[in-house]
Image (cartoon, grey):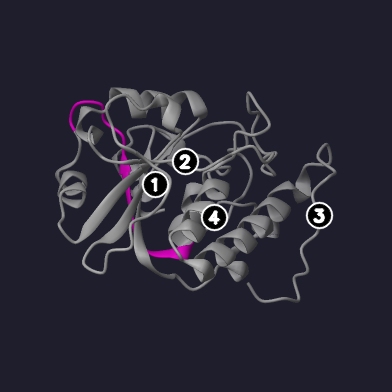
Amino acid sequence: MRLRKQELAKSTREFSARGSRVIRCEECLLPTNNCLCKQKPTPSGDCAVVMLMYKGEYYKPTNTGRLIADVVENNHAFVWHRTEPQEQLLALLNDSDFQPYIVFPHEYALDEPCVSEVTNDALRKPLFIFLDGTWREAKKMFTKSDYLRGIPVLSIPTDQESEYKLREASHGFQQCTAEIAVDILRLAGETQCAENLKTYFHYFRYHYIKGKPHIDDIPHPDESQPV
């Protein structure tokens, strides 16, 4: 959300897209009558996350990357640039306190080391890099970013059908960013963060589609239970 506000401040024209006439909460971007803010968990965790976002993704109310940032305390967001990455991003990738991982399917890796587990290192915290955009945009970010070369590629099985339903996917098993992050956090031993994100994501889906009667298969969370 900080990144979104920074980009809005630099914009020379008003942002307009489908749904732009809806009156939205400035904090969660959902319609004010379906605000999600009361369900926002307290950030926690020992790992860190980087949301490397395709241009415009940070404006979209359907984006789930911001849910991860609400859950993981040490979070960073950057606009993706193919050849001119931000100095702050490069500093994070080269920080000796972190072990970076790119979260992406192994089949797209070229010379990068492919891993399926997170190294338990007391001296280096895991830094998970999520390529946040549409599936096509994420593949472009992965293949066109020379500064990400050599960073281990962390992949998990994604044969489970996505529960997202808010955007069209080429395949049912193409999960959204938050769904992938739940499994990544579990893999890293961040059990509480993973459960917080899973619950928060379910609330997000429920609140978002309250005004979308064409989607009728979303379970109703028990809002009497704390997140």
The reply, left or right, for residue 111 in relation to residue 161 is: left
Residue 73 drawn in magenta = yes
Label 4 secondary element: helix
Where's residue 60, x and y in %? 52, 40
Which callout, 1 or 3, points at the residue further toward the start of the chain? 1
Q: Nearer the viewer, residue 208 or 169?
A: 169
Residue at 29% of width from left, 23% of height from top? 144
Amino acid on which disc 3 is placed: Pro
- Give the extent of the magenta segment: 71-84
Amino acid on which disc 1 is placed: Arg
Give me the disc on residue 4. Answer: 1
Q: Are marks 2 and 1 in contact (CB under 8 Å)?
A: yes
| Foreground tag (1 vs 3) | 3
Label 4 and label 1: CA atoms lie apart by: 23 Å
In the picture, residue 215 is in which quadrant?
Answer: top right
Residue at 31% of width from left, 38% of height from top? 79
Where's residue 173, x and y in %? 64, 34
The residue that label 2 is drawn on is: 59
Which callout, 2 or 3, points at the residue further toward the start of the chain? 2
The residue that label 4 is drawn on is: 182
Residue at 21% of width from left, 47% of height from top? 93
In the picture, residue 82 is in which quadrant?
Answer: top left
| Residue 74 appears anywhere in the view | no
The residue that label 3 is drawn on is: 219
Mark 2 Cα shell of 10 Å, populated few (<14), some (14-19), many (≥20): some
Mark 4 Cα shell of 10 Å, populated few (<14), some (14-19), many (≥20): many
Which callout, 2 or 4, points at the residue further toward the start of the chain? 2
| Residue 17 appears anywhere in the view | yes
Mark 1 Cα shell of 10 Å, populated few (<14), some (14-19), many (≥20): some
Q: Nearer the viewer, residue 209 or 146?
A: 146
